[in-house]
Image: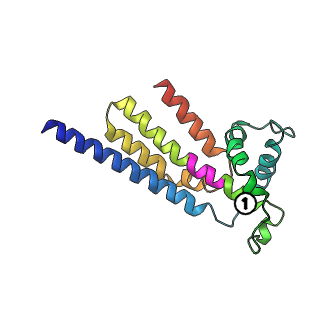
Amino acid sequence: MNQENQGLQKLFVIASLVAILAGGLGLRLLGSGWPPLHPDEHKLTKWVKRTSIQAFVTDQVYPNGFFVMFRPIQWLAVGRLDRPPTPGTASPATDNLDRRLLLLGRAFNAWLGAAAAFLAFLMARAIFKSSGPGLAAAWAVAFHPFFVEHCHYLETEAAMVFTLFLGLLAWT
C-alpha cells in the first residue's frame, strides 16, 4: 500500500508540473502574436539578423548570451525565414521589421520562460527535499505577470532568467 501511495503521489506531482508548465507556456505563446512592439524589439531583431552572420553585437556593448542561445534556433528556421512573407501579414508598425523573425524570437522566449519554471521546480525540490515547494516555485515562475509579459516580447530577460536559474540549480 505504501508503494501504491508513493506511486500516486509521484503521478500527482508529474501531472501537476505538466499542467503548470503547459499553462505557463500557453500564456506566453498566446501573447507572442501581440501587434504592439516593445521599444527594444526593433534593435534586437536587427541584432539577431546580424549575429546569425557575425559572432556578436559590434555597435555597442550588450550581453551576448541571448544571441548565442537563439542562433541554433534561427539556423534551423532559416529555410522558413527565407520564404517570402504571406501577403497581408505586415502591419504598419512592422513594415521595416522582419515579422517572422520577431515571432520566432518571441516563441523562443516563451519556451525559455516555461523552461525557467521547470528549473525553478528542480531547484526548490533540491533545496527543500520535497516536491511541494518545487510545485509552488514552478507555479510562481510560470504565472508571474511580469515574467509572463516579458516572455511575450523579443527581449533578453527570459534568457537571463533561464541562465540564472540554470546556474543556481547547478549550485544547489
Residue, disc 1: 100
Position of residue 4 in the picture relative to residue 119 (left or right): left
Q: Quadrant of residue 127?
A: top left
Magenta stretch in the rendered image = 106-112
- Image side of residue 11 versus residue 94, left or right: left
Q: Residue at x 50, y 59 (%)?
A: 26
Q: Nearer the viewer, residue 24 or 84?
A: 84
Outermost residue toward the right in this view: 59
Residue farthest bottom in this picture: 88
Indicate the quadrant containing the N terminus: top left, top right, bottom left or bottom right: top left
Is residue 3 in the magenta section? no
Inspect this view and state whether residue 107 appears: yes
In the rendered structure, does residue 111 fall within the stretch colored magenta? Answer: yes
Q: Is residue 145 left or right of residue 104?
A: left
Name of the residue lying farthest toward the left:
1
Quick one: label 1, few (<14), some, or many (20+) residues within 10 Å? some
Which SS class for mark 1? Answer: helix
**165 or 80: nearer the viewer:** 80
